[in-house]
Image (cartoon, helix red, strand yellow):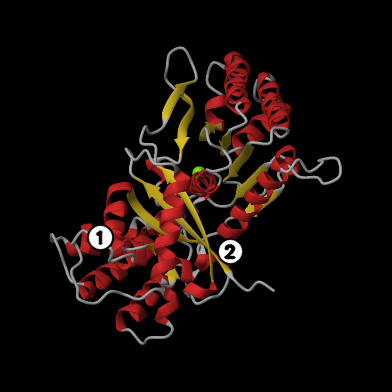
Amino acid sequence: MDTKIPVCVEVCSKPLCTLKYQDIANKVLQILQKRQISFKDGILPFKDLTDDPEENKFILQNIEFIEVTDIEGSQNYNGIVLFWQADLRVTVYQLNDEGGAEEMADEAEEIPACKQWILPSTDFNGLWNSLVFEDDIKSNLLQYATTTMLFSDSLVNPQLINWNRVILLHGPPGTGKTSLCKGLAQKLSIRLSSRYPSGGQLIEINAHSLFSKWFSESGKLVMKLFSRIHEMVEDADSFVCVLIDEVESLTAARKSALNGTEPSDSIRVVNAVLTQIDQLKNCSNVVILTTSNITKAIDLAFVDRADIKQYIGLPGVKGRYTILLSCISELVRVGIIRDDEMIPSWHDSTAVKNEYALRLKVVAEKCEGLSGRALRKVPFLAHAFFVQQSWCTMDKFLDALGKAVDKESSVRAQLQESD
Ligand SMILES: Nc1ncnc2c1ncn2[C@@H]1O[C@H](COP(=O)(O)OP(=O)(O)O)[C@@H](O)[C@H]1O
Ligand SMILES: [Mg+2]
């Protein structure tokens, strides 16, 4: 039995590097094999890689950074894989820095109907890693999408084995659903780069914008959008992610149309979208990602079309600790927090008795009920209200963080009372 553990090594090459991806991959593999380091999630420091001047020159000239990913999520290896255990999978890619291009929904050019990126994009660099979920949600999603692509690519007969290409993420707002879709698209485009040489694209459709005030135009808009997507999909060497964000507005529109409170045009629009999704499902190089902030009232029409319906909930105490810690690390990086000691990750903090870790845990426990989005604001509030200096120590910052959470909780309580 093969007991090796897959380790994904993603090599981001320099924007101007013109070497073949395969040549870079081979060289990196060779360097890693020589050095026999052990692997854990994160950026591989160049200094750990080689002391050979030739190799060093190659790295500095051609490579932006090398990242090891998804060890943590895959299973429990204490987050570290020793060299001899590792089944190295090296992928090479280049980031596209063009950013998202917006397409307008109406002639008056007021509402953006969709946004489009060439993947992998600098806009989403690091996004996947910044998202914290428990229960292997990330690795399961990635595995699901990879299986989808493999089955299509191997021409598995869809009459015999049934699968769609639609993923639905649902749950309360601010829990990272939209970000997770974008991160997944980026990740897939990196992982599948050798299979799709023309590259990947992400097209984000905001469901709200499909119902502009020019209702009669909506139908046309849907057709225009999807005909563009079909054009993109026609190139079998490219890979397309379609993100339909906040599908609950489609559901809501359909419901109120049925109740007679909205023009029946909206039914036509929703049906047009559903038909288009059904057509896209037959294309092997597409993944459709959808999100909804309302869990209970998702249109069955959407639920039925999705293979994976993943609930994304509020982060638990471990997740909250990890998110706050990532904020703290960032403030340490830029020098706003200055301290000789860094707080250990949740995993390590159970092993070491560390005073800062204990204090951060107390804060994380107090943050019950806060979404990821709310948590990422707390460090800012802590500084603005309770630090008010250009830099401070960890001790002072943790203190401020606790106060900021208390303040935030009482503000929230007041808002709820006035509801
Ligand atoms: N689980 C999470 N881990 C890390 N960051 C998160 C998480 N959930 C939300 N965030 C942060 O909150 C912000 C908003 O997330 P978003 O994807 O827009 O949420 P949603 O689509 O569920 O409303 C993102 O910038 C992200 O950094
Ligand atoms: Mg969202």
Would residue 347 appear left or right of 403 to someone viewing this image?
Answer: right
Q: In which quadrant of the rendered view does residue 388 lie?
A: bottom left
Q: Is residue 324 visible?
A: yes
Image quadrant occupied by the N terminus: bottom right
Tell me which amino acid carries mark 1.
Pro
Q: Which residue is mark 2?
A: 136
Mark 2 lies on a secondary structure that is: loop
Above or below — where is 259 with respect to 398?
above
Tell me which amino acid carries mark 2.
Asp
x 71%, y 34%: residue: 281
Above or below — where is 300 with respect to 277?
below
Q: Which residue is mark 1?
A: 53
Give the class, few, some or many, for how many residues have Cα within 10 Å of label 1's Cα (few <14, many ≥20).
few
Question: Which residue ends up furthest to the right in the rendered image?
Answer: 160
Residue 273 location, x and y as percent? 67, 27
Give the class, few, some or many, for how many residues have Cα within 10 Å of label 2's Cα (few <14, many ≥20).
some
Q: Is residue 259 visible?
A: no
Q: Residue 73, labelled with which disc?
A: none
Q: 353 or 45, which lies in front?
A: 45
Residue 187 location, x and y as percent? 51, 48
Q: 52 or 43, which lies in front?
A: 52
